[in-house]
């Protein structure tokens, strides 16, 4: 395993108690604000000393309370990307990047590759005050990479950006995941970021790790949904089959044709598509005369009913697991129960650009 974390730590609001081991790739710590995500990542970084536990990174134990072992941060060889970039304001972009190289003497070829990958060539002479939020984020990623880390930590790195800048930065994290052999521990409460980026998801609830699995497993399970039913959604794996002149991209999810807003890419390119539960309408018979382009047949396999008027239904379809958030009244009127046949209706324009990304 690339990273193993077992720790207990008393926080002001609750006791942090997590236990997980994850392989290489991009691991997302996912949960609502205040669930303990940042405390976990800070413990891995050596910025927080847990009361008890053990943390092992790439085969080396960096913290073990039983042995009184607590390796200092600078000896853990990690890169940390914060919410606010934290660039040195008096240094140019080039000098900020070189600061990372000074820490570990990075290979010059890596330096050139990072600048090319992040599109920083035209920014090297600028100071941080002359950069946009998205540009600052790209420099922060580059500086962390050039420190030669054996793990990259990212604590809600997109939280301070608007939607346009988030859409600009997300593809860079996809490339980090796919092109660099560096494990990444990524904190977020955004289901869209989980769907697009995660190799593995650790779901946190009130300081506890409640589930570990793929993005498809975690987001598609109505019994987990760490942020509640409102954030629930499924992840569909698909490939691009055509680009249409009217601004739509045609994709195939296990043979089921779907349409999404234009996604850059070539025929055959693999995609992940997040379908939010509140964007799915259910029908008990094959619907006709609708403006919606995406209609997928399936069977109800799980129902989660909360204290309010809503219900969350999971459907198994040929395209993959889908979730639908409907009212209990509608569910009763349609006679929906586990085993019922149903048709998921998904509006094409309901799927935002940040919900569609490359496969890792």
Image (cartoon, rainbow, N blue to C red):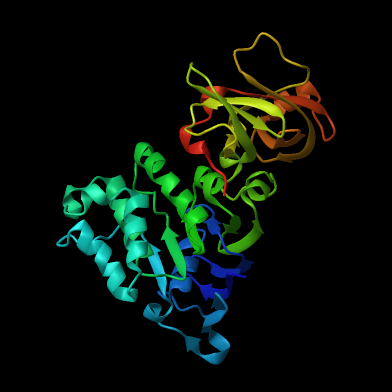
Taking the view exactly as shown, the residue that stands out farthest to the bottom is: 67
Taking the view exactly as shown, the residue that stands out farthest to the left is: 90
Note whether residue 337 is visible.
yes
Give me the residue at 58% from left, 69% from top. Answer: 2
Give me the residue at 39% from left, 78% from top. Answer: 73
Q: Is residue 145 above or below residue 266?
A: below
Give me the residue at 57% from left, 78% from top. Answer: 59
Residue 330 x/y as whole percent:
71, 24
Residue 268 x/y as whole percent:
60, 35
* Front residue of 48 and 264: 264
Residue 334 in the figure: left or right of residue 183: right
**Quarter occupied by the N terminus:** bottom right
Residue 99 x/y as whole percent:
26, 68
Residue 211 x/y as whole percent:
66, 58
Taking the view exactly as shown, the residue that stands out farthest to the top is: 289
* Front residue of 288 and 326: 288
Residue 209 in the figure: left or right of residue 141: right
* Front residue of 215 and 135: 135
């Amino acid at each position: 395993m690339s990273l193993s974390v077992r720790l207990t730590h008393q926080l002001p609001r609750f006791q942090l108690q997590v236990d997980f081991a994850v392989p290489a790739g991009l691991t997302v710590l996912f949960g609502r604000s205040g669930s303990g995500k940042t405390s976990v990542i800070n413990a891995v970084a050596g910025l927080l000393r847990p009361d008890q536990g053990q943390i092992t990174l790439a085969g080396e134990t960096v913290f073990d309370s039983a042995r009184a072992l607590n390796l200092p941060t600078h000896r853990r060889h990690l890169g940390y990307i914060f919410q606010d970039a934290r660039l040195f304001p008096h240094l140019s972009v080039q000098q900020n990047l070189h600061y990372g190289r000074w820490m570990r003497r990075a290979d010059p070829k890596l330096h050139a590759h990072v600048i090319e990958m992040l599109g920083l060539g035209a920014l090297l002479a600028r100071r941080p005050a002359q950069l946009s939020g998205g540009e600052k984020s790209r420099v922060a990623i580059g500086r962390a990479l050039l420190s030669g880390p054996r793990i990259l930590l990212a604590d809600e790195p997109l939280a301070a950006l608007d939607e346009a800048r988030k859409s600009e930065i997300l593809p860079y994290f996809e490339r980090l995941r796919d092109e660099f052999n560096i494990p990444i521990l990524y904190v977020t409460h955004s289901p869209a970021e989980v769907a697009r980026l995660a190799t593995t998801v650790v779901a946190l609830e009130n300081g506890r790790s409640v589930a570990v699995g793929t993005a498809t497993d975690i987001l598609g399970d109505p019994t987990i949904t760490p942020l509640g039913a409102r954030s629930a959604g499924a992840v569909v794996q698909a490939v691009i089959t055509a680009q249409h002149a009217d601004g739509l991209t045609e994709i195939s999810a296990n043979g089921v044709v779907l349409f999404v807003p234009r996604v850059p890419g070539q025929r055959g390119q693999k995609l992940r598509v997040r379908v939010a539960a509140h964007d799915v309408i259910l029908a008990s018979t094959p619907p006709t005369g609708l403006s919606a382009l995406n209609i997928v047949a399936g069977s109800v396999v799980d129902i989660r009913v909360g204290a309010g008027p809503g219900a969350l239904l999971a459907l198994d379809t040929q395209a993959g697991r889908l979730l639908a958030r409907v009212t209990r009244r509608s569910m009763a009127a349609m006679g929906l129960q586990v085993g019922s046949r149903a048709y998921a209706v998904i509006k094409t324009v309901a799927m935002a650009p940040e919900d569609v990304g490359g496969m890792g």
